[in-house]
Amino acid sequence: MYKNYVFDLYGTLADIHTDEWKPSLWENTARFYSEHGAPYNSEELHRKYGQFVDEETAATKKRHPEYEYVDIQIDKVFRKLYAIKGINADDKLVEETARAFRTDSREYIKLYEGIYDLLCELKKHGKVYLLTNAQRAFTWDELGILGIRDIFDAIVISSDEECCKPDIHFYNTLIERYDLDPAGTIMIGNDPVTDVRGGMSAGFDTLYIHTNISPAIDRSTGCTIFIPDGNTTKMKGLLI
């Protein structure tokens, strides 16, 4: 039916729960920084983290006035948290810090039912892409945990592009980089704005699936295919 299948990740292919507000996360992360020469207590670290996220967001918007929706590179925040304590963190340390932070904040991550088989089957009929609003510092490892990283023909992550769904520039990055024909492409996701509205603006057909972490929604999304009950096993029969 389609030449290109473009998937969202979290809430569409994978069920995930994270908690960046639990005190133990900031206590453990402060300990990690302190063990690597950057002394923090949990309160200071949490406050500075939020401050640097806001500053990086503002700087990214200034660099890209053409984008309506921007994303930051969270590794810059982790690096800056070292720098203000006089530590010149190399890439390996920043990666280890991001991995420790994400692992501690993540309660669970797992594929929804039937997803692995779905992706493998779709590969027989066309190309499979991932277009995700996510941080590479977190998501690359999680794709490996899920066992699906090597299935995709290409992966486009918002933090790499400093732009995110539903911005048309982010969709155009995928279209132009991989020479996609919008008329032969479908966007599959669980968010009526980022996935459905964004996909439609790019000229894609859209499949909306309402999963456990979707926002409240009704049939007015305007999507091409609608799965209201979150049953991911239905996608195969509707996409092929």
Image (cartoon, grey):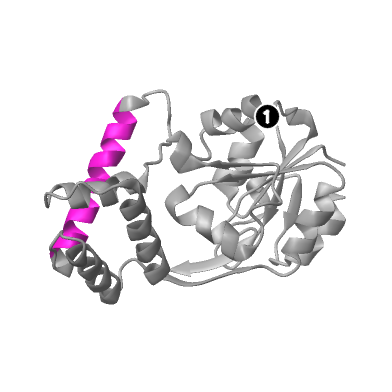
Task: Sort mark 1 into few (<14), some (14-19) or many (20+) by Cα contacts within 10 Å.
Answer: few
Above or below residue 167? Residue 40 is below
Q: Looking at the magenta stretch, what is its main secondary structure?
A: helix
Expressed as whole percent of the image width and height from the top left, the position of residue 73 reads: 37, 43
How many numbered circles are shown? Answer: 1
Give the residue displayed 27% in from the left and 40% down from the top.
56
Expressed as whole percent of the image width and height from the top left, the position of residue 60 reads: 33, 33
> Disc 1 marks which residue?
178
Question: Is 91 or 161 nearer to us in this picture?
Answer: 91
* Picture quadrant where residue 30 is located: bottom left
Question: Is 189 or 92 nearer to us in this picture?
Answer: 92
Above or below residue 134? Residue 201 is above
Residue 45 counted in the magenta span: yes
Give the residue displayed 63% in from the left and 53% down from the top.
149
Above or below residue 96? Residue 169 is above
Expressed as whole percent of the image width and height from the top left, the position of residue 101 reads: 35, 64
Q: Is residue 121 visible?
A: yes
Please tell me whether mark 1 sits on a helix, a strand or a loop: helix
Q: Is residue 215 visible?
A: no
Give the residue displayed 36% in from the left and 52% down from the top.
92
Residue 209 counted in the magenta span: no
Q: Which residues are magenta?
A: 44-62
Answer with left or right where residue 197 lies relative to residue 45: right
Dot 1 amino acid type: Tyr
Answer with left or right where residue 52 lies relative to residue 114: left
Give the residue displayed 51% in from the left and 34% down from the top.
167
Above or below residue 57? Residue 45 is below
* Picture quadrant where residue 119 is located: bottom right
